[in-house]
Structures are given as C-alpha cells and as structure tokens.
Image (spheres, rainbow, N blue to C red):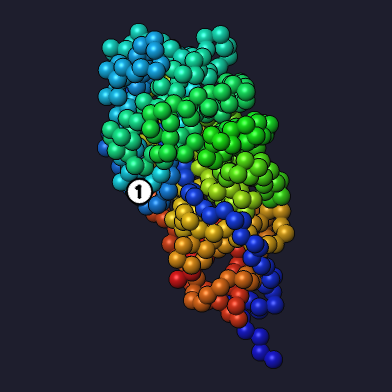
Amino acid sequence: MAVSCTVNGRKQSEYRDVFLGDPTGVTLEAIGAELDPHFFSQNVTRDDGAKEEDWQYVVERVKKMELQKFRVMVLPQWYEPENDNDDPFTTDKSRFTFDSPEMHALYKVLDLAQEQQMEVCIVVWGCPLYVSLLDPAYSHVKTSFMADQDKEGVWITGPTDYDEWAENFSTLIKHLIEERRYSCVKEITPMNEPDGGPLLTSAEYMKMAKTLDARFKTDGIREKVRFNLSDNTDTRTFYLEDCAENLSEVADIFNSHTYIFGYDTPNSVIYNWEKNNVTIAARAGKKHLVGEFGSNQCVGATRQRDIDLYARGVLMTRLVLNFLNAGASGVSYWSLIDQYYGKDADYQQMQQLGLWKYVKEAYRGDSIYAAIKKDYEVRPQYYAYSLLTRFLKPGSEIYPIEFEDDFAVGSAFKDEEGRWTCLFANSADETKLLAINGLLGTGYFDIYRYEEDALPQDDNLIDTTGRVSMKAGKLYVEVKANSVLLCRQQ
C-alpha cells in the first residue's frame, strides 16, 4: 500500500495527530504594544543624535506591523502643572496647558493611531513627586500638586484628592475626544500598577475608581471609553480579586502585568496564571487581558538580559499563545521602542525593552555598542511579534490546539471572514511533526517561519516560505526546534 508523503518527504505516520479544543469563548480584541509619548519631548531634546524626522521609523514600522492597539502613558502635569483652582467641581480650562511640548508629543502618538485606525488605552500613570517640565514658564513646578508628599522611596504616588484627580483625568479625555476628535481613544486606565509600593491599597483604589466613574458620567464621557482596571502586577492577584469583587459596576475590563515567566517555565504554569486571572474577572462578568508582559530576565525596570536574543521571539510568542489559550482577550507588549523617559536621564535609565533600538550613539560605552550596525536597529523579536500583529486579527475566535507539551504550544484563530490562522511556538530542542485535525474548509495555507538562520534583512517582515494543502481533513506541519511557525489559510 502506498503511503503519501507531506512536508520534507516525511511519511504521514510520522506526524502526531493533534486536535482543536473548544473555543475560549472570547474573541481577540487586540495584539498591541506600549508606546509612551517621549520621543519628541525627551529624546529629540537630548542632543544625542535623534532627529524629529526619525519618527518616521516608528510610523513606517507600525504600519508594516499592522499593530492594533497602543497603551500610552500620560502624566497629569503635562496638561495641569498647577491646580486650576481649589474647586474640583468647577474647571478653569484656561489654566490647563494642552499646548505644552509634552502634550504635542502625545498628539504625535495619537495621530499615528488615528491614521492607522488603531485603538488607544490612555494610562494616567499617577502623581509624580518629582517634576521637570520643558516649558520654562513652569520651571518652578517641581512636584505634582496631587502627589502624596509623605510617601518615601517612590517616584510617583496615588492622588491625595480623588475629586481633583477625577477632574484632571476627565478634562484630559474630554479634550482628546471632543476637542481634538481622537476617536482612537477607546479606553482608560487610572494609575499604572497601583499595587506597587503600594501606591494605593485596593480599598483606596476602589474609592478612586468610583470617584472617577462618577465624574466621567457627570461630564458625559463615560460611555465613550472603557474603564480598564486593576492593572496589578503578576504576583499580587489579591488586588485583582478585590477589584473584581468590588468594581464590577465600574470596570469594563480588567488587566494584569507579568514579568515572572522565562525559558524554563512550562506552558502549564503560564496558562494557569492567566486562567486564574480570567476566572477572577469572569466572576464580575468581565474579560481579562494582559496589559504588560516580558521575560523574567529583569535587571531593574529598564533592562531584561535576553532582550537581543533570537530565542526571546520564541518565548514572547509562547507567552502570548498561553495567555490567549487561557481566555485572555488580548495582550500588550512592553514596549515598542527603546527610549529615554527624561531628557536629562542617564544611560541606565533608558528603557531598553523595545522591538528596536534607539540611535546607536546612545549605546556608546555599553558592551553591545560594537555589535550595533545602525540607528534604530530592530531586534529579532520584532520579526516574531510582527507575525502576531499582522495575522491575528481582532474579532477572531481562539481555539487552543490540544497537545500536551511543556515547551511547545499552538493555537488556531478563525477570523471574521472564516479563515484560519494556526500559530505555534516551539521552545524545545526537537522538531514537532503535527497533523492538525478540526480545521473546517478547504484551500491551502501559506507558511511563515521565524527561524534563527533565516531572519529578514533590516526591518523587512517575514515572508511566506511555501504552501501546504490539507490532506483528508488534516493540515500537516513541521514546527522546527526553537522556532515559530504560522500557517495562514488562503
């Protein structure tokens, strides 16, 4: 009896049958990234080689990646450096500085999102204890008027007056949506990682969120944005539990951040972490997403030791697939680009977790300097993450592909047009030969591979390497060791 052959001439019997699991019941909202608006205000102003026209690197790459969502930092002093007045219920718009250099840097990010029909989550980070504004008219402002001056050992605090905070936040969102007409602004998060420090206890956070909700309703903008709440760090699940239990009438969605998973973390641990988050949010009738993620190779808040490794692209994909298989509605990678958050910051304060680097000269004195070939050089993970942003589309149904493996994982996505995309991340040292059962429809699949010896040049994206047709209702694929494989139905 003749036996038909498939990929690389292998016999079908060499392939392991795997099956689509039940859909998660959650459609994909977005594959996004953090883009904090400091390029024009804090980087071009440093005089270390960055130029305004360099912004085109960001613009063109975001377009090529088809990135779907930005999470964007905002600080309250950028537009209200001093309290407008002593009455938080009567706003003096003349005291707000919406034409500040920092705000114009924000508008650049929002202009890009608007042009690309992306969504934006605005995160007002908190109230900084130490402030330095670019406008010399406000050089005397050294702290946020809402900051808790009694807090020690932190650079930012929760607000001391929730009504003032609500006025500040609501005035910002009204300005962005109603005056500047940014329809891309769809979501807000009050405070980044409020559980850290703690900036706010969960009880205080709940009071703040309810005050904010009431103010947005009073100002007629509550229905224009989703409240994305909790924003807790990975090990403080109690914070998410408290928010889900007490803010079900305020929150539209919940999110958590994570930097605790690495190369030796099995899929089950990653999956179970997010599954627990999803279960907690579901008790409140809400979805959960991963608002920040990276590896566990952290060196402070600005570095991760594996940032330049090819293997990081496989790991980031493996993390995302486990999050989505567990029921997450979306993810946002921290962060899109390397950049400084303060124009006078020293080198150790530069955020170096981007999909691409900053100007080469900024890295002089670092051991990586000699290996950098050009300004804004992309890292290997840029190619891997771009596969996700290009082919995993909002509105897609998510089907875990069931095969028990500690370090290889797969998912199938059915988009709104009914076409399938299968994605695998294999961190193991051996190739996985898989026969996928359960894909409905006919036609062939284009194959895209993230492999160390076949990365594109410069910032070009991974192109198809061939086609595979289904045979007798099965799709036969070869997922090579330490690689990512994407199959897109045509």
**Does residue 204 appear in the picture of this structure?**
yes
Q: Secondary structure at mark 1?
A: loop
Residue 231: percent from left, percent from top: 56, 33
**Does residue 240 appear in the picture of this structure?**
no
Residue 45: percent from left, percent from top: 31, 24
The residue located at (58%, 11%) in the rendering is 152
Residue that numbered label 1 is attached to: 117
In the picture, which quadrant includes the C terminus? bottom left
Q: Is residue 50 above or below residue 271?
A: above
Residue 367: percent from left, percent from top: 51, 33
Amino acid found under the numbered disc labelled 1: Gln
Q: Nearer the viewer, residue 250 or 448?
A: 250
The residue located at (61%, 56%) in the rendering is 24
Residue 83 vs residue 448: left or right?
left
In the picture, which quadrant includes the N terminus? bottom right
Residue 269: percent from left, percent from top: 71, 46
Residue 178 vs residue 193: left or right?
left
Q: Nearer the viewer, residue 306 or 166?
A: 166
Residue 395 vs residue 61: left or right?
right
Q: Quadrant of residue 38?
A: top left
The residue located at (68%, 31%) in the rendering is 238
